């Protein structure tokens, strides 16, 4: 049993592999196909894409060509963040399904509570309205789970107030030094599973001296420590790489960090904001 076979059970009973493969910023079609195929060949069974990544077609093709039964792969995609109208949401879902070429998604998420060009804008009414469309999609069986991404407690409360089907997943930015405890605790209380995007802070924390020291003590790479940290915090990491050897490395995380090392990592803050490299002179 490897970490890639570990699963969470969502509140509706659906099983979701803990570790997912991230595909953001893999825009080249051949590269996205290769990376997803490598991840599947290496044993990943959870692939994270989004309409806005522009690679749903390559991801879907890699899933179809893998020879792995569809029922064994968990595929997530997302509604573009700027869509806050239910009819547009349903139309966008149809576009995703036609592009990805799969009969169902395992999980469909609202990409963010606000458009990326206007982070923080109050879109409560829009989010409430599109959640009704998400509930209809869930009832149709074409998405086995529905959820949100980048939602804070207030954003989640808007959805929970009056919904018939509550979100199963909240995908948030989470890594050592950025642990978003308030929303994680809230989700735990509501039985909403939290998945961790950018577990390596998109590469920005790989030189952090305290994390490097823990990695040396564990005899593991810094990336492995970052991914293991997320797992030991009880969340599902979604690491991304386009390189086969790193895709393998990022899944080779069957080790246990001591509580002393976990506490040390828990105390780090703003790990992605400090420049750890050689200063220019
Ligand atoms: N919901 C959202 O709003 C949202 C936002 C951001 C991300 N996400 C999801 O989360 C996934 C992961 O987040 P992310 O893409 O920001 O990045 P990440 O997984 O935190 O880090 C990826 C970066 O680290 C490098 N890397 C990967 N493995 C490495 C290793 N073992 N050693 C050294 N460097 C390594 C990668 O380069 P190479 O590719 O060259 O290896 C890439 O530059 C995304 O792909 C996406 O699926 C979701």
Image (tube, rainbow, N blue to C red):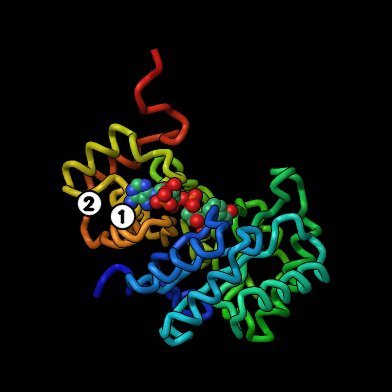
Kindly identify the residue that appears in the image at 42 percent across and 27 percent down: 275
Q: In this rendering, is residue 150 above or below 162? A: above
Image quadrant where one finds the C terminus: top left
Q: Nearer the viewer, residue 62 or 90?
A: 62
Question: Residue 277 location in percent, x, y?
Answer: 36, 27
**Residue furthest to the top:** 281
Q: Viewed as shown, does residue 66 lie left or right of 216? A: right
Question: Residue 113 location in percent, x, y?
Answer: 69, 54
Q: Viewed as shown, does residue 43 lie left or right of 108? A: left
Labels 2 and 1 touching (C-beta < 8 A) = yes
The residue carrying mark 1 has its beta carbon less than 8 Å from ligand 1 = no
Question: Residue 95 location in percent, x, y?
Answer: 72, 73
Kindly identify the residue that appears in the image at 65 percent across and 64 percent down: 51
Kindly identify the residue that appears in the image at 66 percent across and 77 percent down: 97
Q: Which mark is residue 257?
A: 2
Q: Nearer the viewer, residue 141 or 182?
A: 141
Q: Secondary structure at mark 1?
A: helix
Q: Which mark is residue 67?
A: none
Kindly identify the residue that appears in the image at 34 percent across and 60 percent down: 244
Q: Is residue 175 visible?
A: yes
Q: Which residue is mark 1?
A: 228
Question: Residue 175 location in percent, x, y?
Answer: 42, 47
Task: Calculate the distance from the C-alpha at mark 2 to the C-alpha at mark 1.
Answer: 8 Å
Q: Nearer the viewer, residue 237 or 222?
A: 222
The residue carrying mark 2 has its beta carbon less than 8 Å from ligand 1 = no
Picture quadrant where residue 147 is located: bottom right
Q: Secondary structure at mark 2?
A: loop
Picture quadrant where residue 127 is located: bottom right
């Amino acid at each position: 049993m490897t970490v890639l076979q570990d699963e969470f059970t969502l509140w509706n009973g659906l099983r979701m592999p803990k570790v997912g493969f991230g595909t953001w910023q893999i825009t080249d079609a051949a590269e996205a196909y290769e990376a997803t195929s490598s991840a599947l060949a290496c044993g990943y069974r959870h692939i994270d894409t989004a309409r806005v990544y522009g690679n749903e077609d390559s991801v879907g093709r890699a899933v179809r060509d893998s020879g792995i039964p569809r029922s064994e792969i968990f595929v997530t995609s997302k509604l573009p963040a700027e869509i806050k109208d239910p009819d547009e949401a349903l139309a966008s879902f149809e576009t995703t399904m036609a592009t990805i070429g799969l009969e169902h998604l395992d999980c469909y998420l609202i990409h963010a509570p606000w458009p990326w060009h206007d982070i923080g804008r109050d879109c409560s009414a829009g989010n409430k309205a599109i959640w009704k469309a998400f509930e209809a999609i869930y009832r149709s069986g074409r998405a086995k789970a529905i959820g949100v991404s980048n939602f804070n407690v207030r954003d989640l409360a808007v959805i929970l107030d009056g919904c018939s089907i509550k979100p199963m997943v909240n995908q948030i930015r989470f890594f050592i030094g950025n642990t978003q405890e308030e929303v994680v605790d809230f989700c735990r209380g509501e039985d909403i599973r939290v998945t961790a995007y950018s577990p390596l802070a998109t590469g920005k924390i790989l030189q952090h001296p305290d994390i490097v020291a823990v990695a040396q003590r564990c005899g593991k790479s810094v990336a492995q420590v970052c991914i293991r940290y997320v797992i030991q915090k009880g969340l599902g990491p979604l690491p991304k790489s386009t390189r086969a050897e790193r895709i393998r490395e990022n899944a080779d995380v069957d080790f246990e960090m001591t509580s002393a090392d976990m506490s040390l990592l828990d105390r780090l803050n703003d790990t992605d904001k400090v420049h750890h490299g050689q200063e220019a002179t």
